[in-house]
Amino acid sequence: MITIADLPVVNASLNGTSALLLTCGFVFIRRRLIRWHRACMIAALTTSTLFLVSYLTYHFHVGNVHFRHFGWIRPLYFSILISHTILAVAIVPLALITLSRALREKFDKHKQIAHWTLPIWLYVSVTGVTIYWMLYRM
């Protein structure tokens, strides 16, 4: 059974999975494999949604987790954390608009916003894993 203490590794795994699915989805659309692209992007959205639920559950129970290290790593950590947090908030409406345009088959508009959504979403997913590693594994 998963406990609250297990959620940080679950969260990192969900973020890593999301990054992998986003990358695969990008490769598939470049190869014009639309069904596979769609499946990966819906799975990435599902994975990211599960992450958000797990993340909020963890922090509801635990509160803030403080970064314990000092020196040059501290400003690096906070730079990553701040950019991650701001872009994580921005990615929610971006991903929903991108998905909405695809589902309504407005592919020109979908493609325009996806050029912004994909790199931001990838950054948020990868830095989520980075933050986990810096907080819990360093």
Image (tube, rainbow, N blue to C red):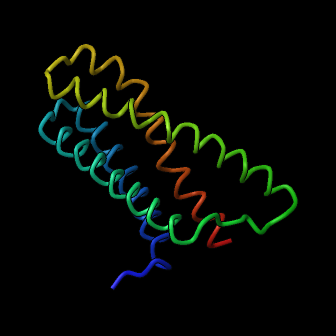
Q: Residue at x 50, y 50 (%)?
A: 126
Task: Indicate whether 29 appears above or below 130.
Answer: above
Residue 108 position, x and y percent, is 24, 13
> Which residue is painted at 56% across and 50% down in the image?
127
Q: Residue 6 in the image: state x and y as whole percent.
A: 46, 78
Q: Is residue 113 above or below residue 77?
A: above
User: Looking at the image, is 3 positioned above or below residue 124?
Assistant: below
- The spot of residue 77 in percent (x, y) is 72, 53
Residue beneath the point at 47% across and 63% down? 12
| Residue 59 rendering spot, x and y as whole percentages | 53, 64
Which residue is at the far right?
A: 71
Q: Quadrant of residue 63?
A: bottom right
Which residue ends up furthest to the bottom in the rendered image? 1
Rendered image quadrant of residue 33:
top left
Q: Is residue 129 left or right of residue 112?
A: right
Residue placed most toward the observer, 87 or 34: 87
User: Which quarter of the rendered picture does the N terminus lie within?
Assistant: bottom left
Q: Is residue 76 left or right of residue 91?
A: right
